[in-house]
Amino acid sequence: MKTKTIEINAREWFDNKNGNSYFCGTVLLNYGLKSEETFLMPFQYGYGSQYESEAKAILTQFNKISIDNENLRMYCERMNIKLIRSIVRGCKQRELKQIEKDYNRKLETV
């Protein structure tokens, strides 16, 4: 089935002690449709729009999209896919870890 929407929801934590940013989140395809799927972006180092690049890599890895030398926003515009991106900055590390726990718990019930 054709991808209609891509929704990226990320949270970012800044480690003041070491001066590094980390993020975690989910990528939701085709929200509200029978073909709806959710993918985890695990806890990892990254700042700025790195979460968008990670979403692109995950969707490519699972053969949901096929992008060569193009960013996700440009690809979505070209393919007429609605792209929704959000990141909440200033989160606590435990909030990011909770995203992974919730995702894994959801997988266990499926």
Image (spheres, rainbow, N blue to C red):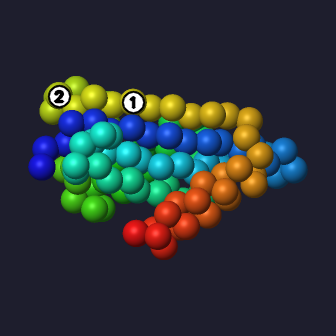
**Residue 1: percent from the left, percent from the top?**
12, 49
Q: Residues within 10 Å of mark 1 (few under 14, many from 20)?
A: few
Task: Determine whether label 1 and label 2 are within 8 Å by CB.
Answer: no
Decide if residue 89 is in sight here.
Answer: yes
Q: Amino acid at mark 2?
A: Asn
Q: Secondary structure at mark 2?
A: loop
Residue lying at the far front of the rendered structure: 109
The quarter of the displayed image where residue 10 is located: top right
At 15% from the left and 33% from the top, the residue drawn is 79
Of 42 and 21, nearer the camera is 42
Of 37 and 93, nearer the camera is 37
Of 11 and 48, nearer the camera is 11
At 73% from the left and 40% from the top, the residue drawn is 91
Decide if residue 75 is in sight here.
Answer: no
Q: Quadrant of the C terminus?
A: bottom left
Residue lying at the far bottom of the rendered structure: 108
Establish if 89 lies above or below 2.
above
**Residue 69: percent from the left, percent from the top?**
24, 43
Marker count (numbered): 2
Establish if 81 lies above or below 13.
above
Q: Report how far apart the C-alphas of labels 1 and 2 lie in the structure.
A: 13 Å
In the image, 25: left or right of 32? right
Q: Residues within 10 Å of mark 2 (few under 14, many from 20)?
A: few
Which mark is drawn over residue 80? 2
Q: Secondary structure at mark 1?
A: strand
**Residue 92: percent from the left, percent from the top?**
77, 46
In the image, 108: left or right of 72? right
**Residue 19: percent from the left, percent from the top?**
79, 46
The residue where tag 1 is placed is 84
Establish if 37 lies above or below 49.
below
